[in-house]
Image (cartoon, rainbow, N blue to C red):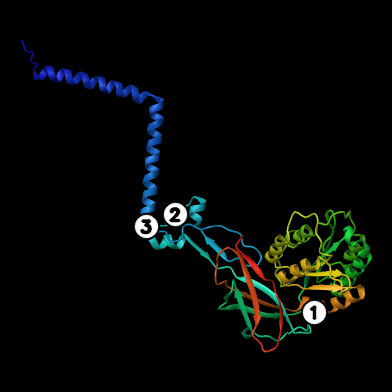
Amino acid sequence: MQQVLSFADQSSVGGGCLHRILKTGRRLADSSFVQRSTLIAGVLLATSGVMLAGVGYWVSGGFDYLSAATYSVPAGFDQGRNVHMPSGLLAGGSSPDAANPSSLNAAYTIRRNVPEVRLQFTVADERGRLIPDLSVSDLRILDDHVPVDHIKQFERMSDLPLRVGLLLDVSDSMKRAMEQEKSVALAFLNRVVRPGTDRAFVMAFGDTVQIFQDPTSVVADLIGAVKQAKGPGDETEFFDAVYSGCVNQWKAAENTPVHRVMIVISDGEDTGSRHMLNDVIAAAQRSEIQIYTLNLHLRKRPYSGDGVLQKLADETGGRFFIANNAREADAIFSELEQELRTQYYVSFRPPDELPGYHALQVEVQNPRKLMVHARHGYYALNQ
């Protein structure tokens, strides 16, 4: 006999199933695991909704400059990066009116000026005499072989205060010339460095790199440091010494124009440094330091280190000298003093703003045969 259920019986069975389902659901709802999972899922869904809304608003043009890269600007550039953020957003106050896109654009604005390259250099004739009367129209600057369209600033500066690093080689290879080397250094201090206006430090290097006098404007203290300079000299940490002088001694920026130079008295030999010549050149170019090098020997007898000293000077806009004795060195410093205090200054926007090393070349468009002493490159951004 076929069993037939009435509508009431079917309702009773369905109600029992529904009751069991609800009972099971209540037990699951009471589970702490399920509660936590539900809460997490809810938060994720809410966050996703906010992000999607923000992306939609950004696509529609609501946020023009909301993101920005942060970077450090080295010497060689003027830092011009202004960031404005709404105080309400940072302090937990009211945010800009979301219904008014113009108010959002005004609140989230990041303005960044393009960095400018600064360059100091001198120009001399064939006999080494300074040329002080050039105009900006006489100059042509190449940045990575591309002519600079516009020189923003051009000045002829004279009587510049000096920031000098005096580096003495006290290694064994200079032992025979040690007294002469110190006489030359003292001649430089007495002739060139002006008390109260200029500042200088004294560093010596052999097996180690030592500071004998921190930057000071007291010439008597500098003279005393030169006389005391000594050290073990089985090896020569020449590159490490110059690198340290460029990186560690003149960190603070100054409000008035100054000329940063390094006077290195050495035979140019290096036997113990961790840094290489290219590291030293890069450090000097980043710090806008011109390096002047001097070796003590007869001109007719070239030394193996002369090529290193020449390259170091050329790449940083300085000059390389050879002197046989303190008298010749004094004549060199007499000529050098005016050059150190008289510089041309230009600033320009780089044609190519790619980070990394940029080669520089300064040319004088003048019928006269003139020589330019300028650094051969700079480093864009923080490379």
Task: Looking at the image, tell me whether mark 2 or mark 3 is earlier in sequence order.
Answer: 3
Identify the secondary structure beneath mark 2: loop
Is residue 120 found left or right of 332 in the rendered image? Answer: left
Is residue 5 found left or right of 76 in the rendered image? Answer: left
- Is 101 placed above or below 256 here? above
Q: Identify the residue position indicated by label 2 in the image.
A: 95
The location of residue 242, given as percent across then percent down, is 77, 61
* Quarter of the figure with residue 338: bottom right
> Is any part of residue 364 visible from this angle?
yes
The location of residue 223, given as percent across then percent down, is 90, 66
Q: Identify the residue position indicated by label 3 in the image.
A: 59
Q: Give me the C-alpha separation between circle 2 and circle 3.
A: 20 Å
The location of residue 314, given as percent across then percent down, is 73, 71
Q: Quadrant of the N terminus?
A: top left
Q: Identify the residue position indicated by label 1 in the image.
A: 338
Q: Which is nearer the eye, 158 or 376?
A: 376
User: Is the residue marked by circle 2 packed among few (<14), some (14-19), or many (20+) residues within 10 Å?
Assistant: some
